[in-house]
């Protein structure tokens, strides 16, 4: 199945206040897209809506993934379709064993309802080694006592375990030192050999140097106001967001 994400004229509110005001975005299989924008522009709202957070109300527009209407699906159904969200602030769940949690998650999305335990453990150990994680973490409580960097590696370990068709990284790079950022990016790039697409939400250029998106979108005031290639990152670094509206107007004029 063609696992293409199509977001069309998406309007979203929370408690009656509009946040997204007509977002359009198309991510095809195998593509890496980056989404940037100032604080409060709606980036994290978009990631939450894509995964079905109940606090947000879609007031207009549509989201389809692989031809399926996502707005009719619960979060767990979206996960079964092959969607995954890596959180900016992963929470600790004391008493929930990491390996058992990952096995349960893998079982939940497996077509037969259960993965082979031997194969699962073999892959888990290999993925933990690849992410330079101590094997003892598999027997700890989920994110319990983990540092910020360890929590982010755990997000990527989940991603490698579940092998989604589409991953959304909501500022996963925030707070990471250069070594942790390298390892996290290495884990994500391992999935590029699969039928995999990625939406990475970030404020910083450095993770994009590892993930190498082909497309960059700038979200401001609830709308994607400018899209282009990776060259936009350098312009943002040099000029900030003040120039974006003028550049967006020129892009729209050229399109007409």
Image (tube, grey):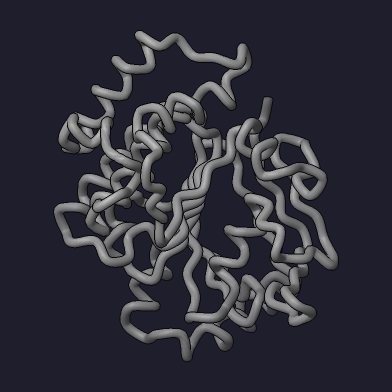
Residue at x-position 58% and y-position 40%: 83
Which one is in front, 133 or 231? 133
Q: How many marks?
A: 0
Which one is in front, 15 or 237? 15
Question: Is 130 placed left or right of 141 in the picture?
Answer: left
Residue at x-position 37% and y-position 41%: 95
Q: Is residue 188 visible?
A: no
Question: Given the current orientation, which residue lies at the most extreme right position?
Answer: 60
Q: Quadrant of the N terminus?
A: top right
Question: Is 142 placed left or right of 26 in the picture?
Answer: left
The answer to which quarter of the image holds residue 109 is: top right
Question: Is 22 placed left or right of 39 in the picture?
Answer: right
Up/down of 228 relative to 211, above or below: below
Point out residue 234 in the picture as x, y percentages from the top left corner. 34, 72
Point out residue 247 in the picture as x, y percentages from the top left corner. 55, 82
Residue at x-position 74% and y-position 79%: 18
Point out residue 220 in the picture as x, y percentages from the top left corner. 58, 79
Residue at x-position 60% and y-position 16%: 113
Up/down of 178 relative to 134, above or below: below
Q: Is residue 94 visible?
A: yes
Question: Is 107 placed left or right of 200 in the picture?
Answer: right
Q: Quadrant of the C terminus?
A: bottom right
Which one is in front, 184 or 218? 184
Point out residue 74 in the picture as x, y percentages from the top left corner. 73, 43
């Amino acid at each position: 199945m063609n696992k293409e994400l199509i977001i069309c004229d998406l309007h979203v509110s929370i408690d009656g206040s509009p946040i997204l005001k007509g977002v359009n975005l198309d991510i095809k299989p195998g593509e890496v897209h980056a989404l940037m924008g100032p604080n409060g522009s709606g980036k994290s709202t978009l990631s939450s809506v894509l995964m079905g957070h109940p606090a947000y109300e879609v007031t207009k527009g549509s989201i389809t993934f692989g031809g399926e209407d996502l707005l009719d699906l619960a979060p767990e159904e979206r996960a079964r379709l092959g969607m995954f969200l890596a959180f900016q602030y992963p929470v600790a769940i004391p008493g929930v064993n990491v390996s058992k949690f990952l096995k349960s998650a893998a079982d939940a999305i497996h077509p037969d309802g259960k993965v082979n335990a031997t194969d699962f453990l073999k892959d888990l150990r290999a993925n933990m080694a690849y992410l330079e994680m101590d094997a003892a973490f598999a027997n700890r409580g989920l994110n319990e006592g983990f540092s910020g960097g360890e929590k982010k590696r755990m997000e990527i370990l989940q991603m490698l375990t579940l092998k989604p068709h589409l991953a959304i990284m909501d500022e996963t790079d925030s707070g990471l030192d250069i070594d942790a950022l390298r390892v996290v990016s290495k884990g994500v790039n391992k999935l590029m050999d699969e039928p995999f697409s990625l939406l990475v939400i970030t404020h910083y250029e450095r993770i994009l140097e590892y993930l190498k998106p082909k497309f960059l979108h700038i979200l401001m005031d609830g709308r994607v106001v400018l899209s282009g290639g990776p060259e936009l990152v350098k312009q943002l670094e040099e000029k900030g967001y003040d120039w974006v509206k003028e550049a967006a107007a020129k892009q729209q004029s050229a399109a007409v």
